[in-house]
Each structure stands twice: as structure tokens, then as C-alpha cells.
Image (spheres, rainbow, N blue to C red):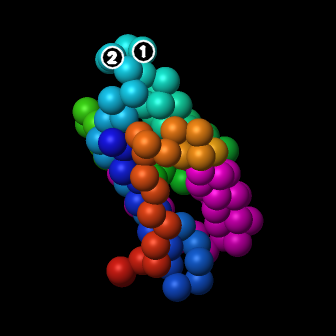
Amino acid sequence: MIRIKISRGADGRIVRFQVDGHAQYDERGKDIVCAGVSAVTVGTVNAVEALTGVQLNARMKHGLLSADIPAQTDADTEHKMQLLLEGMVVMLQSIQQSYGAYITMQDQPSRK
């Protein structure tokens, strides 16, 4: 099972996300659920860094990706970052709608 946690600040902005586990939808190398989630999440980290210039505090190892999103003083950069992250949430929700037996997602207020 893939577990996704989206953490938000009091203002609703995404401040962190974490993805861990494996879908077990199919054998390794053929698991389209794992591949889809990985493409969306890693692609989002890369897009944020390439399009905003903001380096996320991201950690990736086998079966785990976590990223802390730093607050930006520049409103335009913050808006771009959040738009990319909200797009990621929509894409992950789409995967969950089709493959809900293999993926869970929690969108929760931040504990910070």
C-alpha cells in the first residue's frame, strides 16, 4: 500500500508531503500504480526546483519520498510553488480514484 500524507499550514498552504510504501499492484518493474505515483511526486519536486528556483528539502530512498516546502517571502514564487504542489495533489487524487485499493492519501493540517 502506498501512503501519502499532505501537511498544510494554518493558512492552507502545503508545507510538507511524504509518500511511502509500495502498491503491490503488480510485480516490480510492471507496477503502474507505483510508477504513476513516483512520476507525479518526483516530477513535482523537479518542477518546483526548475520553475521557481527553490530547492526543496527532499529526501528519497527506496519506497520513500518526503519533501519540506520552505516559505517564500516573494509572493509570486510562493504562488507558483503552491500551484505546482496543488496540481500534484489533484493528480494523486486521480490515481487514488482509479486504484484506491493500493493507495491512501491524507490531507491534514500541519503539526508545526
Q: Is residue 23 visible?
A: yes
Q: Residue furthest left?
A: 62
Q: Main secondary structure of the magenta part?
A: helix
Mark 1 lies on a secondary structure that is loop
Q: Can you give x and y, in whole percent of width and height, for residue 96 in the image?
A: 54, 46
Q: Please identify the quarter of the rendering in which residue 77 is found.
A: bottom right
The amino acid sitting under disc 2 is Glu
Magenta range is 66-93
**Where's the N terminus, which quadrant?**
top left
At 41% across and 40% down in the image, what residue appears? 102
Q: Which residue is mark 1?
A: 30
Q: Which residue is mark 2?
A: 27
At 33% across and 29% down in the image, what residue appears? 24
The amino acid sitting under disc 1 is Lys
Mark 2 lies on a secondary structure that is loop
Q: Tell me whether the residue at label 1 lies in contact with that at label 2, contact meaning CB atoms closer than 8 angstroms.
A: yes
What is the CA distance from the residue labelled 1 to the residue labelled 2?
Answer: 6 Å
